[in-house]
Image: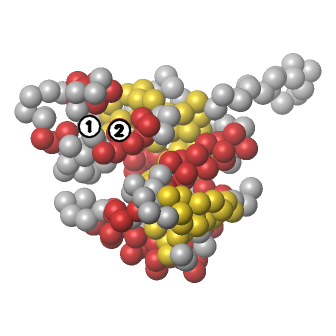
Amino acid sequence: MIILKQMYVHDGRKFEALTIRNYTETDIERLISLQEECFPPPFPQELLWSEDQLASHIKTFPEGALCALINGRIIGSMTALIVQFEPDSPDHTWAQATDNGSIKNHEPHGNTLYVVDISVSPHYRKLGIGKWLMNTMYELTVDKRLERLLGGCRIRLYHKYAHEISAVQYVEDVMEGRKNDPVLSFLLRCGRSPIRVVSNYLEDKESLNYGVLMEWKNPFYKKRAVDHNSPFK
């Protein structure tokens, strides 16, 4: 599935042409610059994409490597791989799910599209770019006939409340409208649902290393019927 989408988004004054497509090796330098812009310290700088990791994304699962452009400039990106997720054993770390960001553990016959990261330039975050990227990944989930889209969510403002409440309570407060978290609230607005809070998910001082597993269930998913006459069961 080659992805190329073109549309218009409104910046509050005029409409801008937006393109979403698969990123390629010629985009690597600009993707690294985007990461630096989107994730300044205290986010661990060693977790920003390297040339080798981005090249691995493109080689391993190019369909899950997306970028968004306005006026030829890359202003957003999103990366995913396919994994086999077992709901009965949900706990994992970001490093385990993504093979330390290389996605070399991509399983073409898995059941879940796993989001590695999503980023949008701070100058373009009011235009709905993130939602368009997420919707494109939903379309990929459907196209691949996968059961769900899944990924871990940072809870960026939790460090301000950790002395008062647990991470689980913080998530509930955001869902009830008592608090707002820029990442969690965004994913909720995109249609993702929290299923579990995981400790030590990712090295992240702002989230105190917590992550919230959030999924989108494919409404068109149907389990493949088992052929009981087949020798391959």
**Residue 79: image location, x then y, percent:** 52, 56
Residue displayed at 50% across by 75% down: 73
Give the number of the disc on residue 185. Answer: 2
Residue displayed at 39% across by 42% down: 186
**Label 1, on which residue?**
180
**67 left or right of 206?**
right
Q: Which element carries disc 2, helix, strand or loop?
A: helix
Check if mark 2's residue and mark 1's residue have beta carbons within 8 Å: yes
The residue under label 2 is which amino acid type? Ser
**94 left or right of 102?**
left
**Residue 48: image location, x then y, percent:** 36, 65
**Residue 19: image location, x then y, percent:** 60, 65
Is residue 161 visible from the viewing direction of this image? yes
Give the number of the disc on residue 92. Answer: none
Q: Residue furthest left?
A: 163
Q: How far is the residue under mark 2 from the one under mark 1?
A: 6 Å
Q: Badge 1: how crowded within 10 Å, few (<14), some, or many (20+)?
A: some
Foreground of the two, 193 or 49: 193
The residue under label 1 is which amino acid type? Asn
Q: Residue furthest top?
A: 228
Q: Which label's residue is closer to the chain start, 2 or 1?
A: 1
